[in-house]
Amino acid sequence: QVQLVESGGGLVQAGGSLRLSCAASGSIFSINAMGWYRQAPGKQRELVAAITSGGSTNYADSVKGRFTISRDNAKNTVYLQMNSLKPEDTAVYYCNADIVGPSATNRGYRYLEVWGQGTLVTVSS
């Protein structure tokens, strides 16, 4: 089984910074895209940032210029550096990974979509 564990969330004042980390562990052959999503109270989950195995990135318009996603393939870890935080950034942030892992019969491989349990980011005004 594959597990994603997030860390780095917390309470910060507006204008502050946080760095989120997400480490994948388990039976992993390789990891394709990784990303961060967030869900604020009463709102739908939205993509914040994503990064491919080759390092190409996408960002939500609301975080461009403030957030930076990166990954360390050797450590199976993705990061989200969040600067100039705003109260509207308050949400539970979820890590997501598109993982290639062993098949159920262990005779091949399969693609797995894996989610972390979430880490809470609260930005006070």
Image (cartoon, helix red, strand yellow):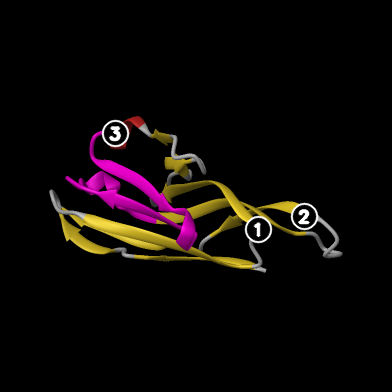
User: Could you give the CA–CA distance between mark 2 and mark 3, rounded to whole angstroms?
Assistant: 35 Å
Instruction: Indicate the position of residue 22 as horizontal and vertical percent values.
Output: 43, 61
Q: Over which residues does the magenta segment extend?
A: 64-92
In this figure, which residue is indicated by the disc labeled 1? 29
- Quadrant containing the N terminus is bottom right
* Mark 3 Cα shell of 10 Å, populated few (<14), some (14-19), many (≥20): few
Task: Name the front one of labels 2 and 3.
Answer: 2
Q: Is residue 40 left or right of residue 12?
A: right
Q: Quadrant of residue 2?
A: bottom right
Q: Quadrant of residue 29?
A: bottom right
- Residue at 24% x, 57% y: name it: 18
- Residue at x 28%, y 57% (from the top left corner): 19
Asked whether disc 1 touches disc 2, contact meaning CB atoms under 8 Å apart, the reply is yes
Residue farthest along the top direction in this orientation: 61
Judging depth in this view, the residue of 81 and 12 nearest the camera is: 81
Is residue 118 visible from the viewing direction of this image?
no
Q: Earlier in the sequence, mark 1 or mark 3?
A: 1
Can residue 56 be seen?
yes
Look at the image and say whether residue 33 sits in the magenta stretch: no
Kindly identify which numbered label has been placed on residue 64: 3
Quarter-wise, where is residue 120 in the image? bottom left
